[in-house]
Image (cartoon, rainbow, N blue to C red):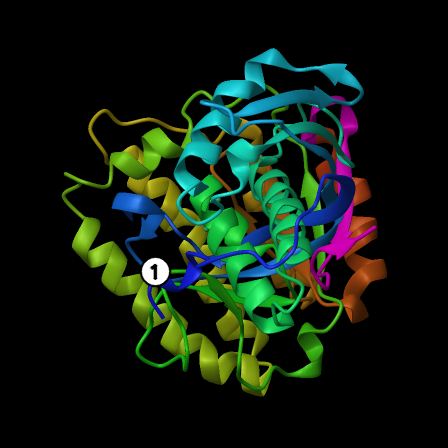
Amino acid sequence: MTDKDFIPSSYTTDKMEGKVTYKSPSNIALVKYWGKKEHQIPANPSISFTLDTCATTTTITYKKLKNKALDFSFDLFFDGKPKEDFKPKINTFLKRTEPYLPFLKAYHFTIETSNSFPHSSGIASSASGMSALALCLIQLERELNPTMNPDFFKKKASFIARLGSGSACRSIEGDLMQWGAHKDTLDSTDLYAIKYPYKVHPIFKNYQDTILLVDKGSKQVSSSLGHNLMHDHPFAEQRFDQAHKNLSKLKRIFEEGNLLEFIKIVESEALTLHAMMMTSMPYFMLMKPNTLEIINKIWTFRESSKTHLCFTLDAGANVHVLYPESEKEEVYQFINNELVVYCENGQYICDQIGKGARKL
Ligand code: PMV
């Protein structure tokens, strides 16, 4: 497939007005996407667990205009209140997606959105937000073209979400999603994410993710700036190569349920992501002292308890603690006894691997 396959030739139905709602989850990458080419094409393939609790719910109410407008026509509400400062980002997204969604200027949209996780928790909402928005728009397109098949619907939703925020393309489905062309993964592509197509050991079923909110402040460096710093990065090529290799190694690890090897890759990926930030020019650091305290505590506890928890990080200071459901009680007690003190206001979110977005 190429991006041209997502340009519709015509629509068979007319739709004057309507309403659509989608709830779409966030995701946490195991092999990280960091660095991109033009048109949101990733510099390396990535893989993630789709989450369940952390999600965005978006409703789009649409009304056909008398005449096609010159610009995009929309109102935006976040938690029921107008949100003017989000509008430029949505405008950029609509502009980028218009060649593939030629109906966009024919309607006025009222976009209402809200997150399940606390506002300014330091949790990136772009993956859940952009995927929910993309799904609402593709659902409208499906109403204009009712014969659209379900497989194409998912591919196009992921493709459109990607144009909003790269990692968002991995939130459409679950529970393990891969994005980016990779020689050892059948049907993998840079255009959209696919469900991981190989055998996954039952130990990964219901895998837990407790998100420790270390720093709830807004990000000092946006991820688009961070991706751009990979362009002239001295270690970029080695890093991209490492991501390919880690994905190849994960194939056997997923199949066999080898948690010791899984931990090595996941933690190394998190630290490499942050090492890339620390070695770019300009350099920056998103980890906080409490991030390091937590990592060290996790290592000590893992050694003494022989449990299999591990950590991963996003582009921020918060720590995602990943562990199998069978170890939930022991790990949960450890988190409460030893890690909560490092969280801002003692806050954390209990999440787990989920099945993807759904229409409400
Ligand atoms: O989707 P973006 O452009 O916000 O990039 C997200 C990058 C990371 O979260 C750091 C890694 C990933 O693969 O999700």
Whether residue 219 is in magenta: the answer is no
Q: Position of residue 177 (x, y in %)?
A: 55, 65
Residue drawn at point x = 38 percent, y = 28 percent? 285
Question: Looking at this view, is 81 or 1 the one in front?
Answer: 1
Question: Looking at this view, is 121 or 102 the one in front?
Answer: 102
Q: Is residue 126 left or right of residue 205?
A: left
Q: Which amino acid does label 1 sit on?
A: Lys
Q: Is residue 183 left or right of residue 207?
A: left
Residue drawn at point x = 20 percent, y = 49 percent? 236
Q: Is mark 1 on a helix, strand or loop?
A: helix
Whether residue 359 is in magenta: the answer is yes
Residue drawn at point x = 40 percent, y = 38 percent? 96
Residue drawn at point x = 76 percent, y = 15 percent? 81
CB at mark 1 closer than 8 A to ligand 1?
Answer: no
Magenta stretch? 342-360
Q: Is residue 157 visible?
A: yes
Q: Where is residue 303 in the image (x, y as percent from the top left)?
A: 61, 62
Question: Looking at this view, is 194 or 329 the one in front?
Answer: 194
- 107 vs 203: above or below: above
Report which residue position mark 1 lands on: 4
Q: Is residue 301 visible?
A: no
Quarter assignment of residue 16: top right
Badge 1 crowding class, 10 Å Cα cut-off, few under 14, some 14 to 19, many 20 or more, is few
The quadrant of the image that shows the N terminus is bottom left
Question: Looking at this view, is 205 or 322 the one in front?
Answer: 205
How many numbered marks appear? 1
Quarter assignment of residue 109: top right
Quarter assignment of residue 225: top left
Q: Position of residue 284 (x, y in %)?
A: 33, 26
Determine the residue located farthest toward the front in the rendered image. 66
Q: Where is residue 69 in the image (x, y as percent from the top left)?
A: 51, 24
- 195 vs 300: above or below: below
